[in-house]
Image (cartoon, helix red, strand yellow):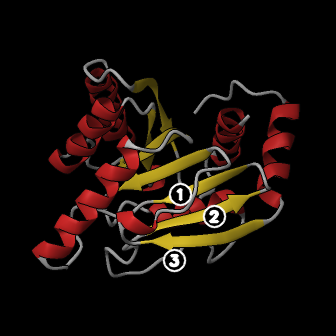
């Protein structure tokens, strides 16, 4: 990802995530949603897309967000206060979790209610595996974000594991798909939590959204 940021931008992003990162609450039902306050930036993605790993890489913590070899371990909206500036919201992973149909229905209701009724929600990052591109379950959350009028940005994860020719094809197809979504930001972001690729740039993006 070619950087559009100055060294000052990078340092501001570093300082933001080097500060306090405090767990605020875990919400598993719409009736116990926390009061609105600080700006919120949400992270969504399929259960094995590397969402928790990316959040940990951004914050420089090893276990702020829980990672697991078992998909679907994030089963609620987890709120983290970052640098006393904004709340990072780790959303339930979707698509592969081995849970009951009733649980999946509850998750969908929770996500839908949160996205459609949260005035403090500034933006949502939707994570897509760079080796596979947009799947049907990803399109569903993108359409929901369109309906809710929540601006969202696509992050392609695990780029260190993708072949360049295949990655270029996924980028092209993803950017073409974004032109059909009203709330989507046109630029695709590329990251690798394992190789720490483009983490600094993504911190800058988050910092600017949280202003």
Q: Which residue is drawn at 80% across and 50% down?
A: 16
Front one among 170 and 206:
206
| Residues at marks 1 and 2, CA–CA distance in whole angstroms | 6 Å
Q: In this view, does 23 lie to the left or right of 134?
A: right
- Specify whether residue 169 is in view: no
Pick whichever, 112 or 131, lies toward us: 112
Quadrant position of the N terminus in the picture: top right
In the depicted structure, whether residue 186 falls above or below residue 42: above
Residue 205: image location, x then y, percent: 65, 35
Q: Where is residue 95 in the image (x, y as percent from the top left)?
A: 21, 62
Q: In this figure, what is the number of numbered marks?
A: 3
Do the numbered discs 3 and 2 sit on residues whose CB atoms are within 8 Å?
no
Image check: 82 left or right of 101? right
Dot in front, 3 or 2: 2
In space, the residues marked 3 and 1 are separated at their CA atoms by 13 Å
Residue at (40% x, 73% y) in the render: 74
Precedes in sequence: disc 1 or disc 2 = 2
> Mark 3 or 2 closer to N-term?
3
Instruction: List the residue tagged with mark 3.
Output: 66
Q: Which residue is drawn at 82% across and 59% down?
A: 18
Q: Quadrant of the C terminus?
A: top right
**Image quadrant in which you'd find residue 39:** top right
Q: In this view, does 17 lie above or below 149?
A: below
Task: Say which residue label 2 marks.
Answer: 80
- Mark 3 or 1, nearer chain start: 3
Dot 1: few (<14), some (14–19), or many (≥20) neighbours within 10 Å?
many
- Give the crowd class for mark 2: few <14, some 14-19, many >=20 residues within 10 Å: many
Percent across and percent down for residue 124 are 47, 42
Q: Quadrant of residue 75?
A: bottom left
Identify the residue position indicated by label 1 in the image. 89
The quarter of the displayed image where residue 6 is located: top right
Mark 1 touching mark 2, by CB under 8 A?
Answer: yes
């Amino acid at each position: 990802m070619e950087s559009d940021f100055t060294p000052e931008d990078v340092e501001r992003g570093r300082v933001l995530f080097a500060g306090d990162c405090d767990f605020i609450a875990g919400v598993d039902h719409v009736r116990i949603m926390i009061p609105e306050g600080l700006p919120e930036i949400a992270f969504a993605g399929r259960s094995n897309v590397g969402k928790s790993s990316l959040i940990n890489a951004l914050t420089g913590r090893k276990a702020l967000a829980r990672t697991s070899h078992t998909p679907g371990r994030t089963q609620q909206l987890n709120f983290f206060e970052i640098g006393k500036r904004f709340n990072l919201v780790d959303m339930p992973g979707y698509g592969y979790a081995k849970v009951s149909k009733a649980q999946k229905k509850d998750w969908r209701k929770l996500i839908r209610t949160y996205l459609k009724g949260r005035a403090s929600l500034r933006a949502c990052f939707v994570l897509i595996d760079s080796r596979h591109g947009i799947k049907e379950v990803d399109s569903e959350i993108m359409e929901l974000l369109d309906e809710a009028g929540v601006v969202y940005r696509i992050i392609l994860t695990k780029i260190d594991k993708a072949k360049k020719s295949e990655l270029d094809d996924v980028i092209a197809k993803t950017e073409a798909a974004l032109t059909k979504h009203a709330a989507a930001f046109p630029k695709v972001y590329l990251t690798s939590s394992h190789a720490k690729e483009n983490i600094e740039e993504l911190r800058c993006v988050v910092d600017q959204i949280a202003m």
